[in-house]
Image (cartoon, helix red, strand yellow):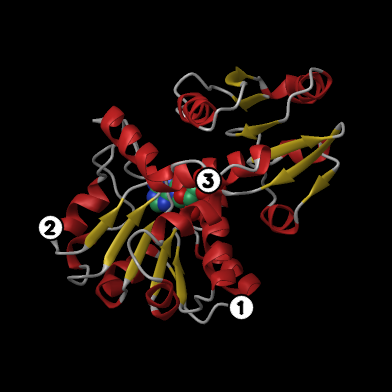
Amino acid sequence: MKLAVIGYPIHHSKSPFMHNSWLKECGLKGSYEALEVPPDQLGEQIEDLRKRNFSGYNVTIPHKENIIQYLDEVEDRATELGAVNTVVIRDGKSYGYNTDGDGFLKSLLTKRTTKEVSDSQILIIGAGGAAKGIAGSLHSFGAEKISIANRTVIKADQLIESHGLTGDSMDLAAAQHQIGLFDIVINTTSQGMYPHIHQHALDATEMKAGSLAADIIYNPLKTQFLKKAEAAGADILNGVGMFVFQGALAFEKWTDKIPDTASMINKITKDMK
Ligand code: ATR
């Protein structure tokens, strides 16, 4: 079974390590490689993967949107998002999916029960692609009390409206004032990602004790946002879980096997330290 991840640049990706470990653990013959694909070569490279009988591949920055035009079929949620992170090739046809939002949800469910998630007042910081996927998965799962804070408020308005969420849209200053009211606060912006480790979109100092701060970033493992949330007495969840679960959902589509996510989260966490 031949698998890959395509992106540009791609050399820092942990996906080959993760999927090659899972292939081995599941007793499957095959390999997962990282392919650096410049934007102007996307069409020809994916045609090449199809001809070379790849079973599928992951898609990462900057190709998640542009890939769609080359696929035969795209699942509804990926079409709505306008972004695909997983492609399955079957009988010469390419099918597009997006496992990012559900990957986040599965990670969240390692910290909170189903009921807690659907009863929680949730604040999502950011309204880009990652936020859209996460809001969509949380909403499908039954959570409705979801507010969105974004630097550009109109994008937060659109996200609230498109999903019919019962929360508010707001700018970052308003969210900063209200942060203590939420049970779960999720950072989906790139603020705080290496090398800009001292930045944060919101200061978590005033988060409620016992609430949960989640970040989709995993480099560093503990962002400034999570550090301050922890100091405030909140639980924290970094982006390793989302990364592992989005990968596991892709792996299941390609192989019909369920990989070991818990030990992979430990391995990647150790590796990042
Ligand atoms: P992704 O697909 O990874 O979510 P994106 O679509 O570019 O990336 O979205 C990035 C998010 O981070 C957006 O919500 C963006 O806010 P804007 O919509 O106002 O651009 C947010 N973001 C990026 N840089 C930011 C900054 N310096 N301060 C606050 N928010 C920022």
From mark 1 to mark 2, how far is it between C-alphas? 34 Å
Say if 227 sits above or below 152 in the image.
above
Q: Amino acid at mark 1?
A: Gly
Which residue is nearer to you in this view: 92 or 11?
Answer: 92
Q: Secondary structure at mark 1?
A: loop
Kindly identify which residue carries mark 3: 246
Q: Residue at x 52, y 82 (%)?
A: 166
Kindly identify which residue carries mark 1: 164
Q: Position of residue 171 (x, y in %)?
A: 42, 66
Q: Residues within 10 Å of mark 2 (few under 14, many from 20)?
A: some
Q: Secondary structure at mark 2?
A: helix
Is label 1 or label 3 in front? 3
Rendering quarter of residue 132: bottom right
From mark 2 to mark 3, how far is it between C-alphas? 29 Å
Rendering quarter of residue 122: bottom left
- Give the mark nearer the N terminus: 2 vs 3: 2
- Give the mark nearer the N terminus: 1 vs 3: 1
Q: Residue at x 17, y 57 (%)?
A: 230
Rendering quarter of residue 159: bottom right
Q: Residue at x 30, y 74 (%)?
A: 178
Q: Residues within 10 Å of mark 3 (few under 14, many from 20)?
A: many
Kindly identify which residue carries mark 2: 231
Q: Position of residue 147 (x, y in %)?
A: 45, 73
Is label 2 or label 3 in front? 3
Residues at discs 1 and 2 in contact (Cβ within 8 Å): no
